Image (cartoon, rainbow, N blue to C red):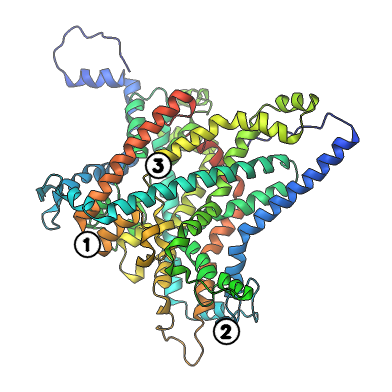
Amino acid sequence: MSEPRQTKQSSFAPERVIRRIFGNQREFRTNLSLLSMALPGIALLFIFAYLPMLGILIAFKDYRFNLGILGSEWIGFQNFRFLFGTDAAFRITRNTLLMNTLFISTTTVCALIVAILLNEVYRSRMSKYYQTMLFFPYFISWVIVSYFVFAFLNGQTGLINQWIDALGIKRIAWYRSAAYWPVILVLANLWNGIGFSSIIYLAGILGISPELFEAAQIDGAGKLKQIRYITLPMLYPMIIILALLAIGRIFHADFGLFFFLPRDNPLLYSTTDVIDTFVYRSLVELGEISMAAAAGFYQSFIGFLLVVAANWVVRRFNEDYALY
Amino acid sequence: MTVRTGRQPTLQNKRYRAQTALSTIAVHAILALIGLTCLIPLILVVSISLSDELRLAKEGYQLLPVGFTTFAYEYILQAPGQILRAYGVTAFVTIVGAVTGLLICSLLAWPLARKDFRLRGPLSFYVFFTLLFNGGMVPFYILVTRYLGLKDNILVLILPYLVPAWYVLIIRTSFAQLPMELLDAARIDGAGEWRIFFQIVMPLSKPVLATIGLFFVLRYWNDWFLALLFIDDSLLYPLQYLLYILMANINIMAANPQTTGMPIPTLSARMAMAVLAFGPALFTFLLLQKYFVRGITIGGLKG
């Protein structure tokens, strides 16, 4: 937005500054109208996005409700010393990173397979129905999913235990056995997200020039060879970029998934407690605001660095796909 | 989604065709299997909601209804009190939130799509930065409860979600593709910016507005997060949060002796509640699926 410098006098005059920014009178009126349109959005973002950003400073304060954020006393890194002195800090970091890694890898692989299959039958009428069946779970809230999971896993009446009974094996107390939960959560996450991801990859495959496939066919390449040597290589940039963007968010767990499905059960914390559930519990249930604030800052800060780093890598890879 | 006519097999030899037919059937079989697997949880929950309470307790949950009955639904609808109330809260929040959000997001997106808007650069960054960094739950919680005083206020279920940066960027992308010459013609006719926005820009952008409107509807309908943080007053429970409360206190229904003499169906009624909660969302989704797919392929690739 560099404007040609036309001002000869450097004397400060408000109207000149305004003119510099907004141009002549007609342009000024247009810009004023446009700015007034944007105002409600600007205000809401300021309140609900920017004020909380400033509020992360309470991680360095001894927050007292009656004193407020500004009035509370600065205590440096004490909250962090407190947080990282507990076992919880390691546990939530490990679980968040581990589970997100599992989520990214399983969803990417399965969605790719599904997208390739969907593409093979894209012209069929059935293709629509497959997409619908795969996609609807994305719009079911985690609260409802917790009912689904409960119907499968609850100790006495759950479906899985009925099946186990039928096989004559000993029943499993799912809600008391932490070891099974990484698998349960991976399956639930896959069920929820596979439709969404496969539709994105399908769009990618549909964007590949059909001539490539025709040429390969004339050369006698079968379907598998076409997938191996055309579809996948053409999708690599997209796969890598989507994975990188997901890695940029690897410090943020899906709160609903980890909070509702294990039903906030302390017996399962060793595998299901993530940064987000820990922050919530400390803040709302335990009232340990300084602990919650420290964990929240830790997440926001490292999460931000990761997003910026991931985006930097994506930009070097392909500028069109970068977030900014 | 962009439609492209598929590849025609250029090789006419019979063996190739037979092979292709076979592999096509296999592909259909695999996709049908995966699709049906996705449906199983849904089928299970609907079956439980239609099952006989006593037999459920004895035989456990089954994939098909045991002793088909609609008693659980009748029971819920007989004494709807809290459930009807939660439906009302959710419906209000969804309608007001979606309409207001769509309007505010569009109004914010339009200047960002205009090349002649001088503050376009800084304002784009202002919107975009909220995607990169956020303060997290703690400052948000303190802001709303202590400074805005919105705890147990129905507005808290609406206001924080009104301007998702992602939606603004999708709308902006679509607005930017409008033919800007139309605006010049309108301007010559003396139309102001606001009139241009409401009489030209909005009507021409129905597809993207439908997509984002639906994103909003499902987001508000499915939300439990804001209620979890800020609602203690049971009169203001939205549907999803009520379901969470019911799940967390499994015996709450048994402890609610509104009916007399009748056995209270806790096992089936709980699942019937879940069905009543996701039913409308699922229906909306089925009806308008193509708009979602369009939105995802625009927004998922490049905002």
Name the amino acid, label 1.
Gly
Mark 3: few/some/many CA within 10 Å (<14, 14-19, 20+): many
> In front: B50, or A235?
A235
Name the amino acid, label 2.
Lys
Q: Secondary structure at mark 2?
A: helix
Mark 2: few/some/many CA within 10 Å (<14, 14-19, 20+): few
Residue B280, by quadrant, is: bottom right
Residue under pointer 1: A287
Residue under pointer 3: A249
Q: Position of residue B75 (x, y in %)?
A: 52, 81
Q: Quadrant of the N terminus of chain A?
A: top left
Q: In this view of the protein, can residue A49 be seen by the observer? A: no
Q: Earlier in the sequence, mark 1 or mark 3?
A: 3
Residue drawn 70% across and 47% down?
A127
Residue drawn 82% across and 45% down?
B22
From the viewer's perspective, tell me whether residue A9 is left or right of residue A193: left
Name the amino acid, label 3.
Arg
Residue under pointer 2: B58
Q: Is residue B124 above or below residue B80?
A: above
From the viewer's perspective, tell me whether residue B14 is left or right of residue B80: right
Q: Secondary structure at mark 1?
A: loop
Spatial CA span between label 3 and label 2: 45 Å
Q: Position of residue A304 (x, y in %)?
A: 32, 38
Residue drawn 51% across and 69% down?
A153
Labelled pair 2, 1 in contact (Cβ < 8 Å):
no
Mark 3 falls within which chain?
A
Spatial CA span between label 1 and label 3: 27 Å
Residue B64, by quadrant, is: bottom right
